[in-house]
Image (cartoon, grey):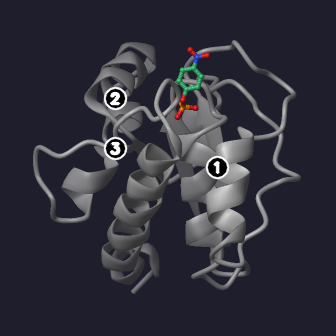
Amino acid sequence: MPVKVLMVCLGNICRSPLAEGILKAKVNPSEVFVDSAGTAGYHIGKAPDLRSIEIASQAGIDISRQKCRRFTPADFDNFDYIFAMDRENLMHLMDLARNEADSKKLYLLLEKAGMPGEEVPDPYYGGPEGFREVFHMIDAATDKLLPMLYRP
Ligand code: 4NP
């Protein structure tokens, strides 16, 4: 059974699709399963934002076939690690947790990657440079996470 990792942001069209694509590019799919979701339901069924697709493709990562979905409490049953991109989404997920086992699966991505207090900022209303920054933050964070994602 692979370790299962869920990346979560607000819309599931900018940050978490990038986090899904970047981590997937670094792991063996038989050992680590990666998915993403949003806490909001504004864009369900849609492909990622074109700016995320573009910045990923510059690194040779194709996220264009991902489909936006909303986080559901059943995800607590299906995933081992649930990484929120920012504190607001972490709080939202904490509210959805049904018990302590659920809440123990929740982490702030950058905090777990050794960058305490830092968040992956929402790039939606900004320009392409925000997407570049988000890409690099997630790329660095997922490098640091790799050792803990493999079962001992
Ligand atoms: P994401 O960015 O949470 O990184 O996917 C956003 C996408 C859409 C919206 C906000 C943030 N929105 O308000 O529609």
Q: Amino acid at mark 3?
A: Val
Left or right of 72 in this view: 133: left
Along the line of sight, which residue is nearer the eye, 63 or 111?
63
Q: Position of residue 31 (x, y in %)?
A: 63, 80
Disc sitting over residue 90 in the figure? 2
Residue at x 58% of width, y 68% of height: 22
Q: Which tag, 1 or 2, sits closer to the chain's start?
A: 1
Q: Amino acid at mark 2?
A: Leu
What whole-number distance in Å separates the C-alpha atoms at marks 3 and 2? 12 Å
Q: Are marks 3 and 1 in contact (CB under 8 Å)?
A: no
Number of numbered discs overlaid on the protein picture: 3
Disc sitting over residue 120 in the figure? 3
Q: Position of residue 146 (x, y in %)?
A: 41, 79
Residue at x 44% of width, y 74% of height: 149
In the image, ligand 1 is in what quadrant? top right
Q: Position of residue 41 (x, y in %)?
A: 68, 14
